[in-house]
Image (spheres, grey):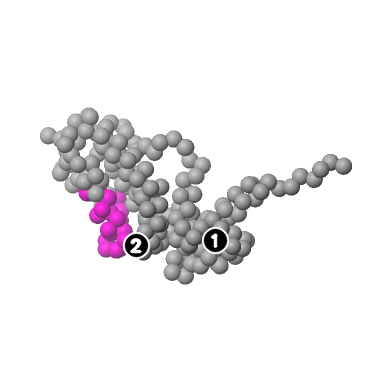
Amino acid sequence: MAQEKRPSTTRRSERSRTAILTAARELVSEVGYAKLTIEAIAARAGVGKQTIYRWWPSKGAVVFDSILSLSEGADDGEIALPDTGDLEADLKTVLRATVAEFADAEFEAPIRALHTEIIGDPELAAAYREKMEAPMREAKKRRLRSAQDAGQLSADADLDLVLDFLYSPLTQRWLTRSGPLDEAFADALVDATLRAFRGS
């Protein structure tokens, strides 16, 4: 008799992990972070609570990984921003895309929840800086260095300060809902930043 094959434990674990992350993203969009519970995530994913706690220490950690998982399956290569040779056009493309992400409920609800959680969770904040913020910030700085080499940005510009000029007003308006987030605002941020830092 042929030996019966058992399902791969790894494959079964990966299915459970995917179900949990999908459930977390869906539920945080549906009920909000405050009402999100590990019990609800487990029920939606069809797993036990102990399965979730074996992999994640808190609901904030689950939500964080659910956001990271959105980029899984993309190219594993280095993150890169558009580089057409036109810095103004490239930055406007990127900031408009950021505005669009903030308007996307699938992205906006979990990332807002994550920002709320990392205020009081130093370990989660460190993971966010290492896995999300730092790689993306470095990709942005590579694009700005290219612009410096091309003479489109001042050679002595502080690139971290340039990025703060570009993104801090956008993030602030999103977090506080203090004004419209649209392409016009994104373009205005790029124009103002380049006036301040463009090479002579």
Q: Residues within 10 Å of mark 1 (few under 14, many from 20)?
A: few
Q: Taking 169 as reference, is 98 left or right?
A: right
Pointer 2 residue:
119
- Judged left or right of residue 183, residue 103 is right
Residue depicted at 51% across the width and 42% down the height: 73
Identity of the residue drawn at 19% across and 36% down: 153
Residue at 37% across, 53% down: 126
Q: Is residue 166 shown in magenta?
A: yes
The earlier-in-sequence mark between 1 and 2 is 1
Quarter occupied by the C terminus: top left
Which-is-in-front pick, marks 1 and 2? 1
Most distant residue in the bottom direction: 35
Q: Is residue 105 visible?
A: no
Classify 28 as above or below 12.
below
Query: Are the residues flagged by discs 1 and 2 in contact, CB closer than 8 Å?
Result: no
Disc 1/disc 2 C-alpha distance (Å): 22 Å
Q: Which residue is mark 1?
A: 53
- Point out residue 7 in the picture as x, y percentages from the top left corner: 71, 48
**Which SS class for mark 2?**
loop
Q: Establish if 83 lies above or below 14.
A: above
Question: Is residue 133 in view?
Answer: yes
> Dot 2: few (<14), some (14–19), or many (≥20) neighbours within 10 Å?
few
What is the three-letter code of the residue carrying label 2? Ile
Report the quarter where the N terminus lies. Answer: top right
Q: Position of residue 70 (x, y in %)?
A: 48, 49
Q: Nearer the viewer, residue 165 or 16?
A: 16
Q: Quadrant of residue 169?
A: bottom left
In x, y percent, where is residue 52?
56, 60
Residue type, mark 1 in image: Tyr
What residue is at 26 percent from the left and 37 percent from the top? 144
Stretch of the chain drawn in magenta: 165-184
> Which of 184/159 is in front?
159
